Amino acid sequence: MFGGIGYIWFVVFLKIENCNCYSKMKALRNKYSILIIFASLIFTSCRKHSSFEYQAKNLSDANIKIMFKTSNGTSSDQTLILGVGETISMYKEDLGAGRVGSSEKKGEYIGAFSKIEITKNNTLTGKKDFLKTASWDYEEMNPHFGIYTLKITNSDF
């Protein structure tokens, strides 16, 4: 009896597999799989991530201390010490897909920071508003990467 049931299942499976609709479904599934893979490759390869880097450059005649906080809310106050003539990266901001030229900060203030305080020789506090966009130099390195540089000089104290 079990041999007969097994034979019936085997015949049914053969009929389904040999059915024209089964082969059409299988071909259709393969076409959709290839289409999905191709579309994924196009979308991921064409949309590059863009970012800004914020740097500080000490052009004064003494060591400086920079205390800052990013405005993304995830970091606490950070402190950097810069020697004379030294340049250091303060923060990198990911903009997502797109171009930096279309996202360049044109407002009055740099949005990446909520606080920037700079001291020289641990006594002189910077009198300039370092959060203002005018305090920073901008250079677009390529369509997906731009650098803001805060150049600190003796006249800032």
Image (cartoon, rainbow, N blue to C red):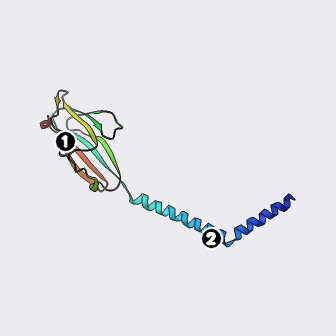
Q: Position of residue 108 (x, y in %)?
A: 20, 46
Q: At x 31% / y 56%, what residue is drawn?
A: 99
Image quarter (top left, top right, bottom left or bottom right) of the N terminus: bottom right
**Where, quadrant-wise, is the C terminus in this rendering?**
top left
Residue that appears at 27% across and 40% down = 113
- Locate residue 122 relative to residue 92 in the image: left or right: left
Image location (x, y in percent) of residue 140: 25, 53
Closest to the camera, between mark 2 and mark 1, is 2
Residue 98 found in image quarter: bottom left
Picture residue at 41% right of the left edge, 59% below the top = 45
Report the side of 4 relative to 97 (left or right). right
**Pointers 2 and 1 in contact (C-beta within 8 Å):** no
**Residue 63 appears in the rendering:** no
Is residue 121 shown left or right of residue 3?
A: left
Residue flagged by tag 1: what amino acid is it? Lys
Query: Compared with residue 39, is residue 69 higher up or lower down, i.e. above or below?
Result: above
Count of marks placed on residues: 2
The local crowd at label 1, few if under 14, some if 14 to 19, many if 20 or more residues have their Cα within 10 Å, is some
Name above or below for residue 49 compared with residue 84. below
- Give the CA distance from mark 2 to mark 1: 67 Å
| Mark number, residue 24 | 2
Which residue matches tag 1?
151
- Please state the horizontal and vertical placement of residue 71, each as a whole percent of the image: 30, 40
Name the outermost residue toward the right. Answer: 1
Q: Secondary structure at mark 1?
A: strand
Q: Is residue 31 visible?
A: yes
